[in-house]
Amino acid sequence: MSNIKKATIPFLIALVLVLILASPVFAGLRVTNPRIEESVSPGQIKTYTMNVGNTASAPADIAVEVRGLGNYITGPIQAIPAENDSSPYSARQFVTATPASFHLESGQSQDVTITVSVPNDVGDGGRYADIFIYTAPSGGGSIGVSTAVAAQVLLTITGSNLIISGDLTSIDIPQAVSEQLFSAIATIQNTGNYHYKLACNGTVWNSDRSQIVGTSWPTDSIYNLIPTFSRQIAVPLNISQELTPGTYFLDIEAYTQDGILLDTGTKAFVLTDTYTPMKLNPLTIEFFDEGQLSMGQWSMAEDGTLMEKVEASSLTSAVTIDILQETIVQGAGGEPPDPIAVTSLDPLPPPPTGNTTVMAFEFSSEGITFEPKADITLQYSSADIPEGVSETQLRVATVNENLQWIFIDDAVVDTDANTITFSTTHFSVYAILAPSSANAVTTGPEKQIWIWMVIGAIAVVLIAFSINTLQHRRAVAVRREQSRRRRRPQGPKNDEW
């Protein structure tokens, strides 16, 4: 499985920099509006505001730099220092950020103004930059630790000629191992002037190309490929039959996720041993909504590798679960996970001190874990928010095994969509919380632990939860057993909702 794992790029320079590129919250920094994706015209000047908060318990000195934007070969977005930023599609030269440095006490925040001054002769296509926000290094000795958030700037030049093209520069096919995932690696370079997300199709033929013996699972890419950069993408193969030793052919089509064909390629490969396809298990997600059950299934390898991207939404679209392809999903003891059951909680659990519970959900599947994290998005209504409380003050908290509240640092509120999104490695009870009064001021989402109530009150709450969900679970017990029996031995097709 090592050929489809996300690679990490270590840096050891004068300091050790802890960098996150996809999330606006990490280890002491919170950045609102961490992405600028806009259409701009030649000669236009536009300004944007990002708010930087210190969520650590100690004060911090913050610096803001405008850098170039690119990709690592493994896919993730890369913030490129000025001295290395030679792309003709860089926006770094006409993007500024002020103030460039400031000091924040714990819980304080600072607005940063991003100004985009588009040159009259900017040219065609897209332009790209990165707002690199980082703390001064901390720690003793010659090596310190700094935390950074890299906010992307993706600009589309209005009315220009957008060229979307790419070259499939290589196809690597390791030797297949029976009952394990058989995966190829395709490398694609963006040869156009505009960004896109990649996808690939693969078809495996026998030695005389008279029979298709396998196709690829759907590929999924969360990263834009920036012009001039290359990236590798895994093409996992769903082999339909046992393959005897001999020569086979793999055809690959590289295209954008919008369906634009970029390039094609073919590579012959030789199997020296018989290959037996791997066995598959289902990942089942069940939503219980007013006594009704909705369900979806996705395929996993025996080791828990998710073969398909999960996008599951129900409870009148109040809950969405997103799990990336290639995520390792396991149940208790490393076994295949039980079905994931999602239920809204009524009555609502009592919140930690100084907060009000807006809504709460239970995600149950004993011992289930995700590596990397799964994303959960909760939809709220403006009517759900207590009077006088701003949407930006909403937070998400979960309940640990000791019945303690733990606030989730990476919860991101989208006030336009009325959603709050966070990441998790496991499932539990999750609640959207609001300050109990309009005068309550959040002090930054440093992790806090609150005891629900005294021991007697906790017992009452647990009984209430159990009574609330027991009727649902009994009502669907037969359906759940049926869903377990429907575990597919092979095949990528999703069940319909």
Image (cartoon, rainbow, N blue to C red):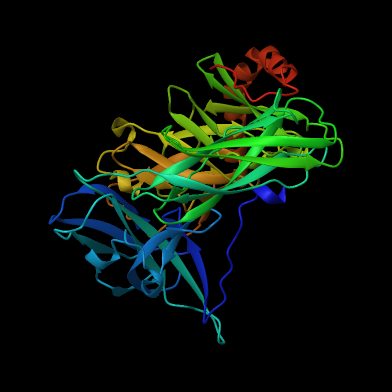
- Picture mark count: 0
Question: How far across and down, in percent of the image, does residue 328 sit?
Answer: 67, 42
One can see residue 250 in this view: yes
Q: Residue at x 28, y 39 (%)?
A: 416
Give the side of residue 203 with respect to residue 485, left or right.
Answer: left
Q: Is residue 27 above or below residue 408?
A: below
Image quarter for residue 102?
Answer: bottom left
Question: How far across and down, in percent of the image, does residue 246 sit?
Answer: 82, 36
Image quarter for residue 358?
Answer: top left
Give 104 or 118, whichever is nearer the viewer.
118
Q: Is residue 242 above or below residue 98?
A: above
Residue sitting at the far front: 208
Q: Residue at x 37, y 33 (%)?
A: 380
Residue sitting at the far right: 273
Q: Is residue 330 above or below residue 85?
A: above
Question: How far across and down, in percent of the image, does residue 119 sit?
Answer: 16, 60
Give 15 or 209, whichever is nearer the viewer.
209
Question: How far across and down, in percent of the image, does residue 254 sit?
Answer: 51, 39
One can see residue 96 in this view: no
Give the side of residue 436 with respect to residue 338, left or right.
Answer: left
Q: Residue at x 38, y 48 (%)?
A: 195
Q: Is residue 400 above or below residue 310?
A: below
Give the side of residue 271 with respect to residue 4, left or right.
Answer: right
